[in-house]
Image (tube, grey):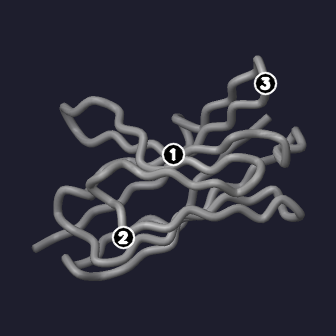
Amino acid sequence: VQLVGSGGGSVQAGGSLKLSCAASGYTFSSCEMRWYRQGPGTEREMVASITSDGAAGYVDSVKGRFTISRDDAKNMLYLQMNDLKTEDSAMYYCTASCGAIYYSGRGQGTQVTVSS
């Protein structure tokens, strides 16, 4: 099972990026999917989540700016990030909670760097 993030990069504050997480080795349509981020010297933070029914949740700091979505036919998870701020800079990765099974793409995340 793999969860591979992509789409990160370096942008200026106010810019946008769309992250993708490609899932393979498992059918994730019944799983709750999440995006996490972790910056240097900071704790891991759950940024956004989406249930198998499509219900989304966000940490307060990204509400109104980030949108999580999923395409189960393609086994893909996305995070549209708008109006990026310097404090959004971090390594972003996705996870999947499938009943009692948990998968993490922490080692295959994608770096986002926002400059002022």
Q: Quadrant of residue 96?
A: top right
Q: Position of residue 86 (x, y in %)?
A: 17, 63
Q: Residue at x 82, y 44 (%)?
A: 28
**Structural distance between the alpha carbons of marks 1 and 2:** 20 Å
Q: Which mark is residue 93?
A: 1
Circle 1 packing at 10 Å, graded few (<14), some (14-19), many (20+), is many
**Structural distance between the alpha carbons of marks 2 and 3:** 29 Å
The quarter of the rendered structure image containing the C terminus is: bottom left
Q: Which badge, 3 or 1, is on the more N-terminal residue?
A: 1
Q: Residue at x 43, y 75 (%)?
A: 17
SS state under label 2? loop
Q: Give, as a three-letter code, the residue at label 2.
A: Gly
Q: Which badge, 2 or 3, is on the more N-terminal residue?
A: 2
**Residue at mark 3:** 99
Q: Position of residue 52 (x, y in %)?
A: 76, 48
Q: Position of residue 32 (x, y in %)?
A: 69, 40
> In the drawing, does residue 55 fall left or right of residue 93?
right
In the rendered image of this protein, does residue 78 appear above or below residue 59?
below
Question: In the current view of this chain or complex, which residue is farthest to the left?
Answer: 116
Q: Residue at x 42, y 40 (%)?
A: 46
The quarter of the rendered structure image containing the N terminus is: top right
In the rendered image of this protein, does residue 31 appear above or below residue 16?
above
Q: Give, as a three-letter code, the residue at label 1.
A: Tyr
**Residue at mark 2:** 64
SS state under label 1? strand
Question: In the current view of this chain or complex, which residue is farthest to the top?
Answer: 100
Q: Give, as a three-letter code, the residue at label 3.
A: Gly
> In the drawing, does residue 59 fall left or right of residue 77?
left
SS state under label 3? loop
Figure label count:
3
